[in-house]
Image (cartoon, rainbow, N blue to C red):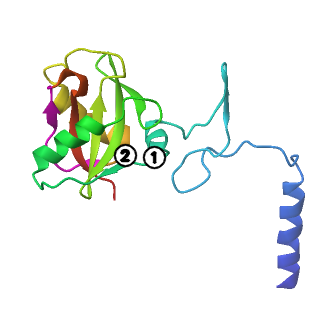
Amino acid sequence: MTRLFASACLICTVLSACNGPNYQRGIGFTGIDGEPRARAASAGGTVSRASGPIQALAARPPQRLRVATGDPAEMAATATAYGGQGAADSIPATLGNAPLRVSMVEVNGLLFAVMRLPEGQRGKLAAGAGPAFSAAVPRLTGCVAVGPAYVNTRPAKSAGVAVPVDCR
């Protein structure tokens, strides 16, 4: 038995010495999630294959607010009013061809994904913005929408859509 174990160790050692220590190619995946851990080079520099809107949004903690009401529509209106428009607390996204900002806001312990027009841009939201954003929430946030989309069109400076989400 010890001869077999010694032979197997010798074979593994010889095979592992075939490549240098900086050889980073694998068999396509390295882990449970199936994503390569190495960085991929692109024309503009080096980007991580794991970067995306979910990771970018997760890097920004949600705003936490408390209001006196327990009405979901009023909590969604508060989330929309305080949802991020700038780069510090939101990420850029597009819905249709319109540029938008997506952020996470927690009101009275209920987490909302909030979509707003970028800072300095005025305009109206498209007619189907609520259902379209609700359908895009899993792709943008990694969370599941657990309620209807609340569209807030007035006042124009705080127009947006809030969707209650569950990120567990």
Between the residue at mark 2 and the residue at mark 1, the CA separation in whole angstroms equals 9 Å
Instruction: Indicate which disc residue 142 carries.
Output: 2
Q: In the image, what residue occupies the spot 19% across and 26% down?
A: 129
Q: In the image, what residue occupies the spot 75% across and 43% down?
A: 24
Corner quadrant of residue 118: top left
Which quarter of the rendered picture does the N terminus lie within? bottom right
- Residue 83 image point, x, y percent: 31, 37
38 horizontally vs 110: left or right = right
- Residue 32 image point, x, y percent: 53, 57
Please tell me which residue lies in front, 5 or 140.
140
75 horizontally vs 11: left or right = left
Q: In the image, what residue occupies the spot 44% across and 41% down?
A: 57
Are the two marked residues, 2 and 1, in contact with CB atoms closer than 8 angstroms?
yes
Which quarter of the rendered picture does the C terminus lie within? bottom left
Q: Residues within 10 Å of mark 1 (few under 14, many from 20)?
A: few
Q: Which amino acid is tagged 2?
A: Gly
First of labels 2, 1 by sequence position: 1
156 horizontally vs 32: left or right = left
Q: Residues within 10 Å of mark 2 (few under 14, many from 20)?
A: some
Q: Which residues are magenta?
A: 144-154
Q: Secondary structure at mark 2?
A: loop
Nearer the camera: disc 2 or disc 1: 1
Please tell me which residue lies in front, 68 or 35.
68
Task: Looking at this view, name the residue that lies furthest to the front.
Answer: 68
Q: Which residue is tagged 1? A: 58
Vertical relation: 7 (above or below) 115: below
- Residue 147 image point, x, y percent: 15, 48
Q: Secondary structure at mark 1?
A: helix
Vertical relation: 128 (above or below) 68: above
Q: Which amino acid is tagged 1?
A: Ala
Q: Is residue 33 magenta?
A: no
Instruction: Indicate which disc residue 137 carries.
Output: none
